[in-house]
Amino acid sequence: MPSTVALTVSRYRPERESEPTSQTYEIPFRKDWVVLDALNHVKDHLDGSLSFRWSCRMGVCGSCGMKVNGTPKLTCATFLSEYPPGPIRIEPLDYFPVVRDLVVDLTDFVRKLQQVKPWIIRKEERPPGEGEYLQTPDQLDTYKQFSMCINCMLCYSACPIYGLEPSFIGPAAIALAQRYNMDSRDQGATERLKILSEHDGIWQCTFVGECTKVCPKHVDPAGAIQQYKLTAATHWVRSLLLPWGSR
Amino acid sequence: MSAPPRYTLYHPRWYRRRVSVWWWLQNRSYTWFVLRELTSVFVAFFAVVYLWQLRALGQGPEAYELFLARLRTPPFLALNTVAFLFVLFHAITWFNLTPKAMVVRLRGKRVPDWVIVGSNYAAWLVLSGAVAFMLLRG
């Protein structure tokens, strides 16, 4: 194993440059280091001006998503030893505006996430004094996978449709909508249908499937979208045959 | 380094990258995806050939013979071979994707993906066998 490795990092300093450039750092090639450790090494010892986001270092917070050698990855879960002998190319996530270096702006996602109402909607709220809404383990099991999303945005960066059609609601937001649609305690599926079955919702997806491949939490957003297409199509047929029964 | 842009402190200038026209060549799965989308053209081609065949059949035995003779010409044989390969690719890739869209639950447990895929292939085999039987019997 070589003792050092070249880390080629995308730099964008808006006060100096009109478009990103890249800078290469020679860092120790340690097999116990993840890409995030390497970036922190650069920040602490080589170049304090490098900007990137991170927080938990254990695949929970979803802050450190970046492109490593062209593939969206959580840098806290990607070991340097996966890329011998280097160089390792680090870039910001695709399709989001770059604020600085490896930091992207996620406002678009947050706005879309709010649109799909990712919370439990009840027709009539029960007073808290009457206790919780109960659920069996089997009922939990139907949506649990979709609830594992950490909003790391790797799926958006892997989705060429989101790049080509920025109005697309996108994989994570639809998976999270589906997480609530499938929750036995939720009664808001009809409200979400209006947003999800519109042009910018599920029908934009042409099933590239990369969102599912890059997801570090095995959420399977592509599956969520295809399953929801089936639900929306069934709903449409039913409303056509029984127009009075669909409300 | 290019000329420094106008920059106002606390008003960031975001950099937005344009998606390249060649995005589908950047990654092998994107290329496979575009090829899979392209297969629809060949599925449509087979449908048109089929309609053409029905029309020839309706016009009588002479027209049908002419239709068959045209199909035997080398350009048509080549085109049909390419189209057949694409339709095969279409069928296989979509069959393999069915478990993503179809989640079947039996007694509270999710039916494994291979059972869903396998049942599609089984149905394909049975139907193809039935068609082959009908054609070869006569």
Image (spheres, coloured by chain):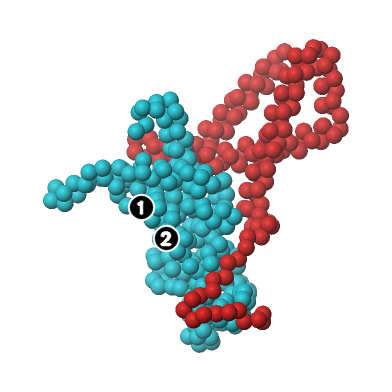
Chain colours: A cyan, B red
Please give the chain letter of the residue carrying mark 2: A
Residue B70 in view of the camera: yes
Residue B77 place in picture, x, y as percent: 82, 32
Quadrant hosting residue B27? bottom right
Q: Earlier in the sequence, mark 1 or mark 2?
A: 2
The quadrant of the rendering that contains the C terminus of chain B is top right
- Mark 1 is on which residue type? Pro
- Residue ID at (62%, 53%): B29
- Residue ID at (47%, 35%): A233
Residue A161 place in picture, x, y as percent: 57, 52
Residue B109 place in picture, x, y as percent: 37, 40
Which residue in the protein does label 2 denote?
A: A110
SS class, disc 1 = loop
**Residue A178 to residue A152: above or below:** above
- Mark 2 is on which residue type? Val
Asked whether A66 or A49 is in front, the reply is: A49
- Residue A118 is marked as 1
- Residue ID at (39%, 71%): A56
The quadrant of the rendering that contains the N terminus of chain B is bottom right
Label 1, label 2: how far apart the Cα atoms are: 11 Å
Q: Is residue A153 left or right of residue A116?
A: right
Residue A82 in view of the camera: no
Q: Residue furthest bottom?
A: A45
SS class, disc 2 = helix
